[in-house]
Amino acid sequence: MNEVPQSWRTQMRSDNELKLGLFGANCSSGRAVTLVEERWSGNWADCKALAQLADKVGLEFMLPVGRWKGYGGDTDYQGSTYETITWAAGLAAATDNITCFGTVHAPMFNPIMAAKNIVTADHIGNGRFGLNIVCGWNEGEFDMFGIEQRDHDNRYEYAAEWIEVIKRAWSDADDWNYDGKYLQHRKVRAKPKPFSGSRPIIMNAGASPNGRAFALKNCDAFFTTTSRISDDETREKVLAIKDQAASYGREIDVYTVGVVTCRPTIKEAQDYFHHVSVERCDWNAVRDILAIKDISPETVGQKAYDEHRIAYASSGMGGTNLIGDPDHVAETLIGWSKAGLRGVGMSFVNYLDELPYFAQEVLPRLEKAGVRMAVQ
């Protein structure tokens, strides 16, 4: 077995300046809170076909949402979801090059069990597994597991111990003990080790100061939002993140999320976006999502509540909308790359229907701009 450098893992086995992947395809409806009939099924046949198509056109990664319980509404938004490590292992077995992530709730997985699950998936994919760590926020999901969610600061303290145990299980150490504030393990043996002598790439998207510090100290890649104003502001955000990582003695790649509506003309894209996210939005699911976050007219006022409703309906529960023709979508992605973003996790209303057009029209524009290379 040839050893693969850690840097090659972190780059997801690609020399492309801008990495592209698909985010949220393991869930029914994907990341579009909509009633339209063509919304994403999330079933296994479609996930497998999508991963194979993404692999064929040269995308770098498949990134799932960590979801255990639907949000309700008329569609039970994201109500049918696959467990993500198993999902990633299945996709890795069906593809050749693409990195398949598992999105793992640290509080819900014993770290020794998680380390073994991840290594199994990693070997199935010949080193193409990635770990996206999440700490969780939906208390209804924690109630399903009989687990009490820790307060905000303590959940990241726990996550730091959890990933430390995971990394030690992947190391050459044997019969080791761990005595932490939250975790205690005795005489641990964990074999085999990750494929090819290097560990999986690790991602996180902590938004709070504590969450961000956790990511920069423990992970290889960090998800953040782009500026709504300019690429210059996005560049400043990226530089601030990298500077903070450097203060911890680390380097980190910065990623973001894009919600793509790409059509031959800008008007077609805008019309379809309005149809999906306004005319046919699952407004009852939006209401239920906001209720989980204690956002209602009574708690925040009607004006702020209406702003939250529109934001959740239009951006797939987070991310920047890329609405336009291929030129506009490509120019936006090129601008993000020049601003220092390493990659983008993209979502579509129907991934399998829309990815071919994106690959046909947008990818060549990115290749011409030099941020991606043509698939050989």
Image (spheres, grey):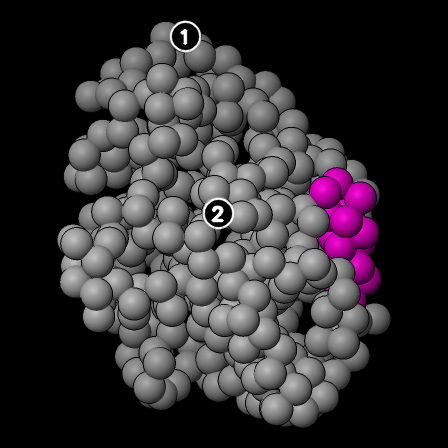
Residue 254 visible in this rendered orientation of the protein: no
Labelled disc at residue 218: none
Q: Quadrant of the C terminus?
A: bottom right
Q: Is residue 68 visible?
A: yes
Against 19, is 22 above or below?
A: above
152 and 177: which one is in front? Answer: 152
Q: Identify residue type, mark 2.
A: Gly
What x and y, as percent, mark residue 204? 40, 49
Spatial CA distance of label 1 from label 2 is 48 Å
Residue, disc 1: 187
User: Is 212 left or right of 318, judged from the image as shown?
Assistant: left
Q: Quadrant of residue 105?
A: top left
Residue drawn at (38%, 69%) of the image? 310
Query: Quadrant location of residue 276?
Result: bottom right
In the image, is residue 154 above or below residue 233? above
Name the one closer to the observer, 176 or 260: 260
Q: For numbered disc 1, what is the local secondary structure?
A: strand
Sooner in the amino-acid sequence: mark 1 or mark 2: 2
Say which element carries label 2: loop
Direction from residue 332 to residue 297 in the image, left or right = left
Task: Kindly identify which residue carries mark 2.
Answer: 73
Q: Is residue 336 above or below residue 328?
A: above
- Which secondary structure class fits the magenta region best? helix
